[in-house]
Image (cartoon, rainbow, N blue to C red):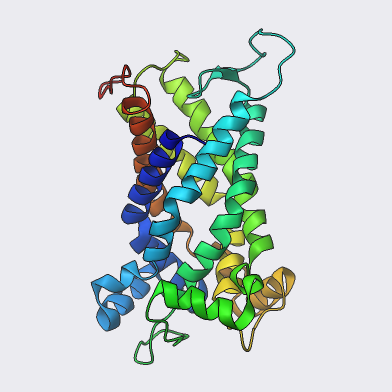
Amino acid sequence: MSYCDFLAGWAAGSSGLLVGHPMDTVKVRQQTLGISSVFKVIKTTYKYEGFLSFYKGLLFPLLSAGILNSVFFGVYGYSLKNIPRTNEEVPVNSFFTAHGRYHTLRETFLCGCIGGVAQVFITCPVELVKIKMQTETGENVKFGKRQQQNYKSSLECVTEIYKKIGIKGCYKGFYITMLRDVPSSGLYFMVYEKLLSSLTRGNERERVEFFATVFAGGIAGMVSWGSIVPLDVLKSRIQADNFKQPTYTGIYDCFRKSLRSDGWTVFGRGFWVLQLRAFPVNAVCFLTYEGIMCNICNPQCIPNTRD
């Protein structure tokens, strides 16, 4: 992967994190700490922990965003460019993608899934630390459940996990993360590429179409996240679980116990928070990525703010 891929991926991921992390904290607490009301989570968090508590766990994802998004976008782009073709004919029912070739929905979905597989190896430990920090409430907070793990920083959190459990502990929740991220990554890129192609009338894009990119990126984020909310609930609960006295022994056990204690509605917790967060985060993410790839990697590309 090139320097441009890393730079664009880092910038895209960082901008998305800064925009969406507060709502992500609300979503994680809603899913893991026993309060279903979004407004009550926000009110309680702000009352007892202050505004900066919404940014708990941000440092580790922010530092890793460059690698994560470079891998995610880079592997996806590389896969698209290297799809074997028997000839140079345009495939039936294909559309022009941002990577300079015509591709089908199936191709973009499969390449997105490949990108999803690659990023999981980074996503899992990063989100584990993030969730541990986000669910650390302290003893005075009036949540349905309280978690006082006493991690002073993300670095201390990951260090303690590694010391006590080793690399295996850093990958707690790996399989549910894989189930969540691989198909949703395929759906993410498929929706984005198809929608952007439709909005730009299938033309070979030589500039950043501002409103089309924002809309396509935002909708792609909403669709992909909306499709895997139940899996995200299970992942959050498994990764937030106590290492010393775990409540869940695996994915099925987490599903069974969550259903028994909270009913079917628990698997929809965080849906509206995710939807509210997904549009601006992914709109900013794609706009940043496309803008940097256009202006730095291809200086002849001139941004266009009019669709």
**Residue 51 vertical placement versus 8 (above, below):** below
x and y percentages locating residue 26 in the rendered image: 39, 67
Image point (51%, 18%), residue name = 100
Q: x%, y% of residue 158?
A: 50, 73
Q: Nearer the viewer, residue 230 or 69?
A: 69
Is 299 situated left or right of 200 in this image? left
* 52 up-or-down from 142: above or below: above
Q: Position of residue 297 (x, y in %)?
A: 37, 27
- Is 304 in front, or is 117? 117
Whether residue 230 is situated above or below residue 3 in the rendered picture: below
Nearer-the-camera pick, 176 or 293:
293
User: In which quadrant of the rendered image does the C terminus lie?
Assistant: top left
Please say if 3 is above or below 261: above
Q: Quadrant of residue 238?
A: bottom right
Q: Is residue 195 left or right of residue 43?
A: right
Q: How many marks?
A: 0
Q: Residue at x 62, y 27 (%)?
A: 105
Residue furthest to the bottom: 139
Please indicate whether residue 142 sits to the left or right of residue 117 in the image: left
Where residue 3 sits in the image (x, y, percent)? 43, 36
The residue sitting at 54% across, 40% down in the picture is 188
Residue 265 shows up from this direction = no
Q: Is residue 197 visible?
A: yes
